[in-house]
Image (tube, rainbow, N blue to C red):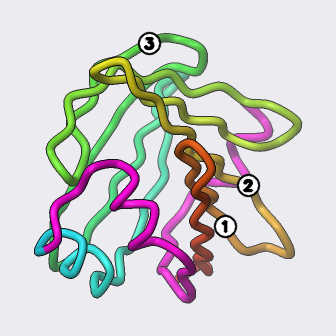
Amino acid sequence: YIMCELFLGSWKLISSENFESYMKELGVGFATRKLGSLAKPSVVISTNDDIITIKTESTFKNTEISFKLGEEFEETTADDRKTKSIITLDNGALIHVQKWDGKETTIKRELVDSKLVVECTMNKVTSTRVYERV
């Protein structure tokens, strides 16, 4: 849990690349992709004992997940997918795998130069979003 401490706090989106292509790969509709692309979310990461909470807030949608590392949980995503998700810590990165309808996407969160770098991958499409501390 020591590693997780580094992720704690409030973050705001400062750059986003290829996010619309990633959403398209997820199967997100056109209108929702447009809204999702414009949204500048803030992310708050906190812990309570061994439970980690990630809150994402934007004009588009607010979501919140609470989980224990390595334990599967049910998640409803911002684009309303109902997924079975699991988050693990690997080499200092939080690896978040979502599975639904026979599909799978991976969201990797890691700290690079004190920024939170979020890499979303589905099939061969990757989006990189960078957040800085608030």
**Which amino acid, mark 2?**
Glu
Residue nearest the observer in this picture, 46 or 40: 40
Q: Which residue is mark 2?
A: 110
Residue 116 tag number: 1
Give the Cα distance between marks 1 and 2. 6 Å
Please state the extent of the stretch shown in magenta in the rendering: 1-30
**Residue drawn at 62 percent across, 80 percent down:** 132
Q: Give left or right: position of 13 versus 28.
A: right
**Which amino acid, mark 1?**
Leu
Displayed quadrant of residue 127: bottom right
Residue farthest to the top, as pictured: 71
Q: Position of residue 3 (x, y in %)?
A: 79, 40
Task: Compare marks 3 and 1 and give the one earlier in the sequence.
Answer: 3
Q: Give left or right: position of 13 versus 133.
A: left
Q: Residues within 10 Å of mark 1 (few under 14, many from 20)?
A: many
**Residue drawn at 41 percent across, 47 percent down:** 54
Secondary structure category for the residue under label 2: strand
Q: Is residue 133 magenta?
A: no
**Residue drawn at 57 percent across, 87 percent down:** 15
Q: Position of residue 103 (x, y in %)?
A: 40, 27
Q: Give left or right: position of 18 versus 38.
A: right
Q: Which residue is mark 3?
A: 72
Dots 1, 2 in contact, CB < 8 A = yes
Q: Position of residue 62 (x, y in %)?
A: 19, 60
Q: Is residue 21 above or below residue 25?
A: below
Give the Cα distance between marks 3 and 1. 23 Å
Q: Is residue 16 magenta?
A: yes
Dots 3, 2 in contact, CB < 8 A = no
